[in-house]
Image (cartoon, rainbow, N blue to C red):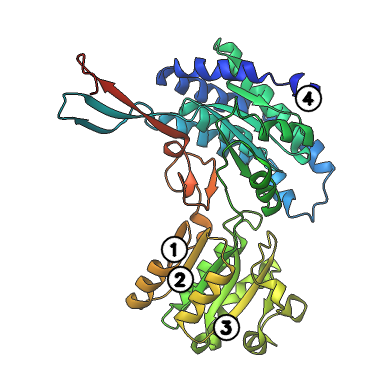
Amino acid sequence: MSALVESVVDFSAIKQASRDALALNNETINQVLQAVADAAVAQTDYILAENQKDLDRMDPANPKYDRLQLTAKRLEAIAQDMRNVARLPSPLGKVLEERTLENGLQLSKRSVPLGVVGVIYEARPNVTFDVFALCLKAGNVAVLKGGSDAEYSNLAIAEVIRKVLQEYRLNPDLMSLLPASREATHELLNAVDAVDVIIPRGSQNLINYVRENAKVPVIETGAGIVHTYFDKSGDLEKGKSIVFNAKTRRVSVCNALDCLIIHRERLRDLPKIVQKLASEEVKLYADKLSYTVLSGEYPDELLSPAFPEHFGTEFLSYRMSIKTVSSLNEALDHIANYSSKHSEAIIAEDEVAVQRFMQLVDAAAVYVNTSTAYTDGAEFGMGAEIGISTQKLHARGPMALPELTSYKWLVYGQGQVRE
């Protein structure tokens, strides 16, 4: 293990913290989470000052800027998420299955912590709070590896959290923040004897790197290449508000709309569907048919012909592509070819089309007549989220407390031996 990581994080100490976590009761955990939420608000000025140091190093035009930026309002929301997590029932010790065998052995399958959860993330300082809260509530130790873009912010947040842990006389290694360096990433990816699972949160490049280089098991939280299909039966008023919200609510997040697919029989309504996007200066990359319809109806400076690279792209900015299709099947084919299996939506009144879309679209979250902006752990009633998993093993969709647990079998006997 490199001296750089050893000087900051002792993996043997983290393993000890994982054992200590098993002994924590839910009441203490909830008190700590409430205290951290209070401290986050009380230390708003300090956290924002450190966050500003990170912001000063980043171009405001960078799509990551919005993810990096903290505000007093955002800190209040983060604190509220932690309080919501504290109010949730503990995911631990749940009896998942019970039975008695013919030989009299009593079997009980019960939920337990994953153990040590490593999270590698980029310019998202809110993740530091979210991961700590969810991991602690589920009895896990959090080992965090943030990016250099958010280094000052993450250090400030980690300091606030660890001070609360010390005030409650808990092991401060229940949460560790590694240096923002590639060497630290390498150490974490190879910590097979100390870390039980690694969860990357960030760009597709980051996710690919972790998947290809980790010796520790990985749960992927994929990039969001998000589509909304406006069917020939779609309601215009619903479509206008859904498309605007999905695209502009917060463009830098993974559930933001990237491609509007529209049935050619509804092209006449396209200018009305996208009209409000111009107020947010959303640039549209339209295919041949939609470009013809939008010419003169949408600001020229915000309208461009679409090229192949505009499809299958996670824009993370005020940009969106438009694809015209002749049928639901063609829309399904387009989604299958370009989706990252994150969030997909249909706007339709035809129940047959709705049911076919819901059945055939392969994504973690599939929506009918509503915005993809709802793909979020807090919105799903989970308190917060560790990420949005786009894989199918162990977890899929917003990951929160249940997904941060495993299980073990407890077997009770009365002297039975196997022949």
Residue 91 place in picture, x, y as percent = 39, 31
CB atoms of marks 1 and 2 within 8 Å: yes
Is 259 rendered above or below residue 21? below
Residue 181 in sight:
no
Q: Residue at x 74, y 79 (%)?
A: 304
Mark found first going from the N terminus, 3 or 1: 3
- Quadrant of the rendered image containing residue 285: bottom right
Is 355 rendered above or below residue 35? below
Residue 261 place in picture, x, y as percent = 55, 76
Residue designated by label 3: 324
Q: Residue at x 79, y 42 (%)?
A: 55
154 left or right, relative to 349: right
CB atoms of marks 2 and 4 within 8 Å: no
Disc 4 versus disc 1: distance between alpha carbons? 46 Å
Q: Residue at x 62, y 43 (%)?
A: 200
* Residue 346 circle label: 2
Disc 3 versus disc 2: distance between alpha carbons? 14 Å
| Residue sitting nearer the eye, 244 or 287 | 287
CB atoms of marks 3 and 4 within 8 Å: no
